[in-house]
Image (cartoon, rainbow, N blue to C red):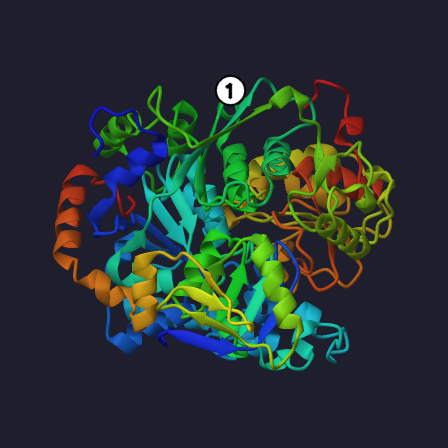
């Protein structure tokens, strides 16, 4: 503990979880919640089995199936793809053998691991949370320290409930002022990545602060924290406040009664102390942010929707020129072309970045009374069975299907090209997911990252579009 | 894990920044439940054409780089997902060392856990080493972890920095879990304290 020295939110959670310190300063860090899924765990359980080790804390471990499953009705009749089926069955078998709680595939609580943790009230302030998935940073929105780990580390946590870690540096990203009409959390985080670059947060944990962050609901904060890894930071976090506590009170598995009162007393001590040291500080003005869209194959290659495709020859050095030429070629673009003129084949609304009820509502608000353009396939994939049920209770599914959107079952879907929802070579997609890497959504696929409202607008227009043209000012 | 002490081998130049994990191993190949067999899918979107045939323009399809044991690239190598399949694919192909100006954090961690050594050297040095690599099969690089140097074909030695604990684990091929379990009493007492202080953990 560092006594009277002012500490950041990250410092406080870190200090509270150090079990032991090795002579070189590496900490043995206790993990309060370990989320697992089918893709990054089979080899870890195999390792336990071979070494004759047990799962140390089944009660702090929770499994769910999300990455490789189809999001159509086929899940009700059994998984078709034999490799996917084997991976899912392996998780089920490992859960039974090691006593790990697992949400069954055909359960309302099934969904994307980074949607269900907060939704169920399992991801809470002050916790350390890990999962074999880089978007674990999402849970930092709860005021937790949450980060992605590899399979060897998954095995380490299964066996010991700890990780060997060196402390990260502290970085603050402050977003001040009010967001303009048509702009969302997704536009904030894309603008941040455009500013700091894909390696801007490497070695750091980002704390998002400022009144524009404070004003976001929990879904918005999750969207921002989710993409921290796209800026190179393993973890992103937002200090817990009344918005957080109100959210937790509505969750099925969050603490209740006296336990909640005790928890609240501690959670209220977590926000960064005045005068605490940040190794890096970046400040943005929210009112300067306009709806964002990526044009290239790295999340940092982002522009306002009003922009044009950059000219690679104008870049400063040859390495960057070569990189930009490759992007322009891969993405099938012409320098100087207006982004709003880019015709799309697919619109994807989903993923751990943007598949919560608030995201579905934003898409439905644009879709209401309109039609998806001819030749465009538009998918809406809720982040969990509970999100799906809520959306259906609100009639959002009807609005969307009447407009020509497909309404699907919960899962990772078209975010990552490992289940049947994929782009085919050359297809252009307006996507609410988090990565626009070459081939990410399927070999040869072309991804433009944007907000749910912007994706819905693109689906209707048939090309990338400015969501601000889709509604009278002030109606958002 | 196999220990890493000294490696002398062919180095392949990959003059790109932001080589992400979806490039290293696309997600559609992550369905295996084993740690091996990923080598044939390493850089699949570059190595193979749409019809599945080899793309002769990609460095790992050219001689002598089919037998590369070292890969040299530019900034932010391994960015993107946490998939440990990335170092598994490199290892399964035969690559045991990646040299780059810097690495994404999770890939960097994952590499050490699998006996793949990530070496950070400034961009100018990486460019020089790529020039060496382009000389072909007779121009082998040596990566000496014990002495923390990369030896160029000319005999010039380039020192590199590495975390001492990770170096120790790698030199001895040690698995972290065994090491951590030596702290079991500290973990037990942490859990006892936590149970009293935070009874809400573990869900309602």
Query: Relative to residue A143, is residue A189 drawn left or right?
Result: right
Task: Give the secondary structure at mark 1.
Answer: helix
Kindly identify which chain the residue marked by label 1 belongs to. A
Seen in the picture, residue B44 relative to A298 is either above or below; the reply is below
Task: Give percent across and percent down for residue B194.
Answer: 18, 43
Where is residue A442, by image quadrant? bottom right
The residue depicted at 58 percent of the width and 53 percent of the height is B123
Question: In which quadrant of the rendered image does the N terminus of chain A lie?
Answer: top left
Name the residue tied to disc 1.
A211
Task: Give percent across and percent down for residue A327.
Answer: 76, 52
Query: Relative to residue A172, is residue A55 drawn left or right?
Result: left
Frontmost residue, A179 versus A381: A179
Task: Give percent across and percent down for residue A98.
Answer: 29, 68
The residue depicted at 77 percent of the width and 21 percent of the height is A472
Where is residue A359, by image quadrant? top right
Question: In which quadrant of the rendered image does the C terminus of chain A lie?
Answer: top right
């Amino acid at each position: 503990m560092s006594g009277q020295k002012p500490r950041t939110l990250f410092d406080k959670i870190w200090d509270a979880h150090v079990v032991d310190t090795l002579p070189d300063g590496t900490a043995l860090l206790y993990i309060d919640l370990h989320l697992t899924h089918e893709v990054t765990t089979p080899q870890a359980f195999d390792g336990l089995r071979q070494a004759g080790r047990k799962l140390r804390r089944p009660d702090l471990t929770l499994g769910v199936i999300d990455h490789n499953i189809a999001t159509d009705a086929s899940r009700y009749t059994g998984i078709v793809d034999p490799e996917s089926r084997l991976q899912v069955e392996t998780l089920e078998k490992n859960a039974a053998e090691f006593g790990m709680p697992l949400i069954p595939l055909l359960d309302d609580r099934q969904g994307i691991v980074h949607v269900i943790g907060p939704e169920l009230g399992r991801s809470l302030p002050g916790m350390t949370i890990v999962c074999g998935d880089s978007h674990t940073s999402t849970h930092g929105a709860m005021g937790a320290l949450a980060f992605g780990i590899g399979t060897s580390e998954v095995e380490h946590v299964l066996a010991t409930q700890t990780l060997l870690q060196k402390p990260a540096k502290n970085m603050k990203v402050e977003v001040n002022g009010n967001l303009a009409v048509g702009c969302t959390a997704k536009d904030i985080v894309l603008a941040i990545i455009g500013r700091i670059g894909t390696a801007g947060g490497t070695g750091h944990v980002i704390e998002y602060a400022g009144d524009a962050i404070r004003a976001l609901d929990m879904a918005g904060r999750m969207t921002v924290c989710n993409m921290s890894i796209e800026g190179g930071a393993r973890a992103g976090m937002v200090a817990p406040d009344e918005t957080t506590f109100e959210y937790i009170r509505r969750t099925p598995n969050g603490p209740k009664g006296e336990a909640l009162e005790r928890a609240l007393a501690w959670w209220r001590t977590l926000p960064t102390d005045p005068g605490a040291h940040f190794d890096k500080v970046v400040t943005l003005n929210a009112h300067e942010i306009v709806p964002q869209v990526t044009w290239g194959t790295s999340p940092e290659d982002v522009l306002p929707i009003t922009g044009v495709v950059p000219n690679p020859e104008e870049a400063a050095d040859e390495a960057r020129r070569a990189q930009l030429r490759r992007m322009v070629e891969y993405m099938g673009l012409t320098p100087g072309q207006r982004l709003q003129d880019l015709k799309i084949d697919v619109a994807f609304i989903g993923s751990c970045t943007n598949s919560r009820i608030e995201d579905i509502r934003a898409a439905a608000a644009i879709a209401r009374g309109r039609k998806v353009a001819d030749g465009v396939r538009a998918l809406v994939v809720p982040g969990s069975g509970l999100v799906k049920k809520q959306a259906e209770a609100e009639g959002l599914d009807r609005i969307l299907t009447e407009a020509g959107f497909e309404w699907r079952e919960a899962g990772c879907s078209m975010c990552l090209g490992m289940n049947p929802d994929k782009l085919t070579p050359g297809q252009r997609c307006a996507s609410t997911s988090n990565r626009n890497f070459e081939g990410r959504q399927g070999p040869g696929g072309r991804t433009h990252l944007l907000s749910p409202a912007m994706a819905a607008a693109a689906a209707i227009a048939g090309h990338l579009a400015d969501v601000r043209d889709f509604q009278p000012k002030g109606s958002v | 894990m196999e220990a890493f002490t000294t490696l002398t081998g062919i180095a392949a130049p990959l003059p790109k920044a932001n080589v992400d994990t979806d490039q290293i191993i696309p997600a559609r190949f992550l369905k295996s439940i084993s740690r091996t067999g990923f080598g044939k899918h390493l850089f699949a979107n570059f190595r193979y054409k749409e019809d599945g045939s080899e793309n002769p323009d990609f460095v790992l399809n050219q001689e002598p780089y089919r037998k590369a044991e070292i890969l040299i690239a530019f900034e932010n190598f391994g960015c993107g997902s946490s998939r440990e399949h990335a170092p598994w694919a490199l290892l399964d192909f035969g690559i045991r060392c990646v040299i780059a100006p810097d690495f994404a954090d999770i890939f960097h961690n994952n590499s050490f856990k699998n006996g793949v050594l990530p070496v950070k050297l400034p961009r100018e040095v990486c460019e020089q080493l790529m020039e060496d690599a382009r000389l072909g099969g007779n121009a082998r690089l040596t990566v000496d972890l014990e002495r923390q140097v990369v030896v160029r074909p000319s005999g010039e030695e380039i020192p590199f920095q590495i975390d001492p604990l990770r170096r120790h684990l790698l030199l001895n091929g040690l698995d972290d879990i065994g090491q951590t379990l030596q702290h079991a009493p500290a973990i037990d007492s942490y859990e006892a304290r936590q149970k009293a202080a935070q009874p809400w953990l573990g869900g309602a």
